[in-house]
């Protein structure tokens, strides 16, 4: 079976700027894939090449086995893209926008699916409202609906939750999750790393146009957690027990944070606290999250 | 939401559906604001007709037996058709580029030929509406014979297809609205005004006559007018050849731009 997305040796230069630098990536059908990276890393450029909005300087890309240049018609029928920029056509209402987008893909009489999309994205009451009169978050959801109007097997969302409120973000992810369970491949970029951690089964991190990390989310977290945990303690006394001073503690208000190699060390730390005659008022073991992994990867490369 | 509605197989599509929809959208775009895109230009043109016909009525008779006001009507109708065909594609393209909503037509599986075809056909329709309205009002002012109806239709279509495609080209090249309006005011308007709309170029001094013959819009107007009066400044066949070449060249140019992705796909 061909990959949902296959990218080989992809480079993209804008003048002297190397926006993508030899990217290889293979995303399998059914994956929920996260594309992370700081501003300017090349995420949108990568998506643009997939969508045919930008042309690669070197290398090739395909969607469900269809080359995005040589077989662009098939590639684009299999791909739905939510662009990062909040764009809309002020001439039309929400429903007109979706009908027209549907028509561009050669799908007429698609109203049942359009109604379904409007409902899932909480836009039914705005169906006949002009695009101009929508709030930013609503416009963003129309963009999501537009990307899905032709039921593409591969859906790429470039920061779909930027500017969407918490409740609707939850709703949006629930909906995208259902699409994923129904078999759609989902690729997303986001700067909310907790979203990526919760949703994505696999993650690629980009920096300056290169893939600097590529693994399952679980593996990325496991490696980081084995390497680095901390315990945060709030003690009854205000001075730090002498025995703890050797553990490189970091003061943090009236609490102290101590690196933790493994859980056995926790037992020793507590014993040291007891021996000093103090007691523990609060204790948190802090595990690195995707944000920590991300920061580590970015500083390492 | 029920999951059975999410088949992973791509839905069967109508291969011409994309083109038809883009044509519909480009038509709807101007039709929704037809006060500005059809009615207003027709009113302006009719004002020209009233003023010029009144001022010059007794001074010139261009073709034997044809009153000046009659002579003026087809020229003005063609000018309205051409200018509005240009305005339709150019404004649509520049607006979509500026607002970024051009992605909506760059993402679907539309070919360069479908995009050019839909934009140009919609502009021809707007040109046709404007031109017809001017003719209808004009026929009420002055007698208007129609010697060769087929020629009238053919020149109208080819002329607006040329200017529609030119508008698309100009819209693609321009990065800002001022660049586009400079092109419109320094190229399109002079070419149409100096195409013998208000006069027969045979009444001009030889130098200007020769210069007029370098203006492709002159042939559009002249051929169109021949369709009404059976008389023209140059042979209608020459006009037809020039206008057909214009259609081919400008549409080919637009096609090349879309194929290369120039300024549209980075
Ligand atoms: N059309 C363009 N012309 C010139 N340079 C561009 C163009 N598009 C992007 N770039 C440059 O390419 C690099 C990658 O940009 P890109 O938009 O892909 O980043 P990104 O990872 O999506 O960032 P963000 O998180 O801010 O959206 C940036 O340095 C950007 O300035
Ligand atoms: Mg981006």
Image (cartoon, rainbow, N blue to C red):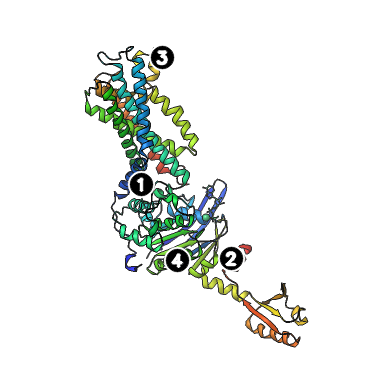
Q: Which residue is mark 2?
A: A294
Q: Who comes first in sequence, dot 2 or dot 4?
A: 4
Q: Residues within 10 Å of mark 3 (few under 14, many from 20)?
A: few
Residue corresponding to mark 4: A171
**From the viewer's perspective, is the residue at label 1 or at label 4 nearer?**
4
The quarter holding residue A149 reads bottom left
**Which mark identifies residue B111?**
1
Q: Report the residue at 28% width, 31% height from top.
A: B132
Quarter the C terminus of chain A occupies: bottom right
Q: Position of residue B64 (x, y in %)?
A: 26, 13
Q: What is the C-alpha distance between the residues marked 2 and 4?
A: 26 Å
Mark 4 is surrounded, within 10 Å at the Cα level, by few (under 14), some (14 to 19) or many (20 or more) other residues, namely some
Percent across and percent down for residue A255 are 70, 75
Of the image marks 1 and 3, the number of the one nearer the N terminus: 1
Q: Is residue B174 left or right of residue A66?
A: right
Is A257 left or right of A134, judged from the image as shown? Answer: right
Residue at disc 2, CB closer than 8 Å to ligand 1: no
In the figure, residue A184 lies in which quadrant? bottom left
Image x and y of residue B263, in percent: 47, 42
Badge 3 marks a residue whose secondary structure is helix
Q: Mark 3 = which residue?
A: B207
The mark tally for this picture is 4
Q: Dot 2: within a 10 Å radius of its alpha carbon, few (fewer than 14), some, or many (20 or more) residues? A: many
Foreground tag (2 vs 4): 4
Discs 3, 4: same chain = no
């Amino acid at each position: 079976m061909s990959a949902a997305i296959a990218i080989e040796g992809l480079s993209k230069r804008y003048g002297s700027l190397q926006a993508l630098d030899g990217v290889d990536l293979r995303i399998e059908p059914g994956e929920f894939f996260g594309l992370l990276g700081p501003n300017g890393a090349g995420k949108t450029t990568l998506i643009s090449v997939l969508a045919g909005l930008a042309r690669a300087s070197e290398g090739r890309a395909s969607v469900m086995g269809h080359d995005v240049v040589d077989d662009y018609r098939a590639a684009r029928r299999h791909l739905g893209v939510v662009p990062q920029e909040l764009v809309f056509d002020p001439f039309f209402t929400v429903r007109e926008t979706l009908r027209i987008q549907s028509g561009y893909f050669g799908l007429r009489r698609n109203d049942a699916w359009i109604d379904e999309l409007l409902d899932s994205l909480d836009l039914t009451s705005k169906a006949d409202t002009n695009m101009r009169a929508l709030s930013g978050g609503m416009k963003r959801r129309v963009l999501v609906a537009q990307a899905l109007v032709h039921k593409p097997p591969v859906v790429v969302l470039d920061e779909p939750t930027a500017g969407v409120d918490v409740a609707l973000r939850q709703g949006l992810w629930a909906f995208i999750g259902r699409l994923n369970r129904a078999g759609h491949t989902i690729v997303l970029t986001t700067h909310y790393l907790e979203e990526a951690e919760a949703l994505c089964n696999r993650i690629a991190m980009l920096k300056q146009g290169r893939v600097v990390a590529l693994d399952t989310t679980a593996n990325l977290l496991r490696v980081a957690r084995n390497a680095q945990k901390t315990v945060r303690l709030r003690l009854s006394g205000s001075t730090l027990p002498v025995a703890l001073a050797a553990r490189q503690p970091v003061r943090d208000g009236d609490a102290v944070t101590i690196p933790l190699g493994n859980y056995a060390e926790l037992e020793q730390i507590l014993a040291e606290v007891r021996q000093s005659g103090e007691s523990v008022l609060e204790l948190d073991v802090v595990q690195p999250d995707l944000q920590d992994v991300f920061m580590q990867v970015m500083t390492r490369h | 939401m029920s999951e059975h509605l999410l088949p992973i197989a791509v839905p069967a599509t109508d291969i011409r559906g994309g083109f038809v929809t883009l044509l519909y959208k480009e038509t709807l775009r101007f039709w929704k604001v037809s006060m500005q895109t059809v009615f207003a230009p027709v009113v302006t043109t009719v004002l020209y007709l009233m003023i010029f016909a009144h001022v010059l009525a007794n001074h010139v008779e261009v073709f034997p037996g044809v009153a000046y006001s009659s002579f003026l009507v087809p020229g003005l109708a063609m000018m309205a058709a051409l200018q509005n065909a240009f305005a339709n594609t150019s404004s649509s393209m520049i607006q979509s580029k500026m607002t970024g909503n051009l992605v909506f037509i760059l993402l679907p599986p539309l070919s360069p030929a479908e995009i050019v075809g839909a934009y140009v056909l919609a502009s021809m329709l707007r040109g046709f509406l404007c031109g017809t309205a001017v003719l209808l009002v004009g026929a009420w002012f002055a007698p208007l014979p129609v010697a060769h109806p087929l020629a009238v239709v053919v020149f109208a279509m080819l002329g607006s297809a040329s200017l529609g495609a030119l508008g698309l080209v100009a819209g693609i090249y321009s990065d800002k609205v001022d660049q586009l309006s400079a092109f419109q005011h320094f190229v399109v308007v002079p070419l149409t005004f100096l195409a013998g709309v208000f006069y027969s170029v045979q009444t001009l001094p030889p130098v200007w006559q020769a210069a007029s013959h370098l203006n492709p819009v002159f042939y559009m107007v002249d051929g169109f007018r021949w369709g009404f009066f059976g008389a023209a400044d140059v042979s209608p066949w020459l006009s037809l050849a020039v206008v057909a070449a214009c259609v081919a060249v400008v549409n080919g140019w637009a096609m090349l731009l879309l194929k290369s992705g120039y300024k549209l796909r980075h």
